[in-house]
Amino acid sequence: MGEAFTALGINLPQLIAQIANFVVLLLILRFTLYKPVLRMLDQRRERIAEGLGAAEQARAEASDAQERIEAQLAEARGQGQEIVANAQQVAARIQDEARQQAERDREAAAERSVQEIQLERDRAIADLRAEFAEITVTAAERVIRQSLDEDAHQRIIEETLAESDLGERS
Amino acid sequence: MRRFRLPLIIIAALAWVVVGLIVARGPQPEIIVPAEVITKVGFLNISNTMISAWAAMFILLVGCFLATRTMKLIPTGAQNFVESIIEFLMGQLEDIAGSANARRFFPVIATFFIFILLANWMGLLPFFNAIGKTEDIGVEIFHYIEEHHEHHEPFEEEIAHSSGWLVDNVGIGLVLPNANDAHFEMGAGAANPVPAEEALDKYIVFLAETFTDFEAEGSDGHGPAEVTPEMLTAAVAALNADPDAPKLLPANEKHAVPSAALGDDLVVSGIDFPGQKLALIIPLFRSVYSDVNNTIALALISFFMVEFWGLRTLGFSYLGKFFNFSGFIPFFVGILELLSEFIRIVSFAFRLFGNIFAGEVLILMLTFLLPFLIVDIIYGLELFVGFIQAAVFALLTLVFAVMAVEHHDEEHDDHEGEAVHDDMESQGTPGQ
């Protein structure tokens, strides 16, 4: 056994030295390599998770806002349509009223013109009658230009006229 | 033209291999299993693997310090690189051990992986096993002979064979191409011990053969089988004639080894090498885990950490796995479990050592046999082996740790892992 140890060069001091070397290396690496690097990796993972969370939140918020805006838009659109519909109704009513008013005006005007025409006609008839009586009187005067006084003449004419259609109609 | 492409490539490759043989063929490498000691500090041998381990540690520490000095949330450059490694390892651990255990095991497992990987890959750097201090084999052989002479011990099996390279007289040496190697054999064996004085004669003849034109009868260049007085006299003459050849120093009060063939006519107190030395170059850097000490150290740490985690998590019930007195068979199984726990140390240590040492020897020998091209393939293979061994060491430690912190039952099998265990638990094993 001892010979094998010599042949392989096993010696205790070097063995212990190597163990010490390794332990020292382990400790130093732990503080200069593993700890900072692992801490950095954890920190980065945290940061990324944070970032992703924030992004997720932002996305959710954005979609929320989008929904809200869309709802508002839909509402506004509905309101607009309502307003337009109202306006159209009002317009139609106004139009209707205007039409009716116009109708009424037109009818009134027509009535008035008929009345006026009637009045005119009546006046014309009256004028005509007066003038005709005068002409008749004048004519009869010329014809009979004698004893008959003017009052008698007038009465006769009146009677004549009353018998005629013209007198009845007035 | 296309028709000639493949033959051309083959011819070029062969030519390249031949160029390598001419230009870069080194002396035959000496495969030494124990890590060579560069210097001693108190009772601690500073071996070349220890120096390499320190170099790897230094690189890791400086690299990590620079990479993590200013950590930023948005990583750049080195920080990116370091983070990707840590994240990869953490991911693997979490897959196997679960999130909570992964955090606990991470520092040890990650250090295993990173350090073994770096050490293995560093071992493939060109200056590993190439630059080193020269160890004077020529003088050392004489010291051995002198020691044996003083204690009147004949040479038995040890130092029956010594090898060295003929290198220039320098302190820090580089293994040079076309350097010659020399092997000295004493021809000793337990059945046929060679007295120290005879060994000296053989050594003198060997030196004369190696450094001068002298040729001995019945010698194959590794030292003659039998040394006659005439042969020895001729050899000494040849050594004295050549100014660059090694010189035998005359006896003084402290050191004196007489020759066997010439008796008191030739007494030597030492050998001086004025020209080239017979020496080995002891590399300053050698792959860290080609040294059993280092792999055993890691295996022990792995073992202690696994037991520590097991005890910490399960308390004394963890020991129930090993000491089960509910019956003869459970008791026996428990003892086997306990044994396997210790056998792991050996398997951990020798798996890593075997792979890395074999890879190193393979590269050294192939570099000696065919310096160019073929070695490149082995380098690629060794990169892979280095990674696999690092991963295997870390993963096995992790798996054992996961097994240790689980609640065990007596039917649990070491080799089937947690899946089986989970199954058993979910089925509610009868008799519990």
Image (cartoon, coloured by chain):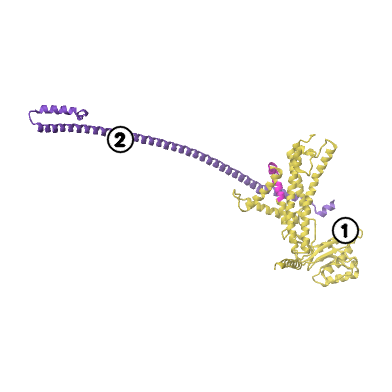
Chain colours: A purple, B yellow
Amino acid on which disc 1 is placed: Glu
Find residue B160 and report its horizontal and vertical position in percent: 86, 60
Q: Say above or below: A50 vs B42.
A: above
Identify the element where label 2 is drawn.
Answer: helix
- Give the residues drawn in magenta, as a range: B99-113
Residue at the spot of label 1: B157
Please determine if labels 2 and 1 lie on a single subunit.
no
Q: Say above or below: B192 vs A71.
A: below
Query: In front here: A61 or B57?
Result: A61
- Give the residue drawn at x 62%, y 46%: A40
Q: Is residue A150 left or right of residue B367?
A: left
Q: CA distance from mark 2 to mark 1?
A: 152 Å
Residue B220: tell me if it is visible: yes
- Mark 1, Cα crowd under 10 Å, few <14 / some 14-19 / many 20+, is some
Amino acid on which disc 2 is placed: Arg
Residue at the spot of label 2: A106
> Is residue B147 a member of the stretch shown in magenta?
no
Query: In front here: B140 or A113?
Result: A113
> Is residue B101 a member of the stretch shown in magenta?
yes
Quadrant for residue B145, please give it: bottom right
- Give the residue drawn at x 56%, y 42%: A54
Query: In front here: B19 or A78?
Result: A78
Q: Of the residues tagged 2 and 1, which is closer to the observer?
A: 2
Q: Which subunit holds the residue at mark 1?
A: B
Quadrant for residue B252, please give it: bottom right
Find residue B163 and report its horizontal and vertical position in percent: 82, 63
Specify the quadrant that holds the C terminus of chain A: top left
Q: How many marks?
A: 2
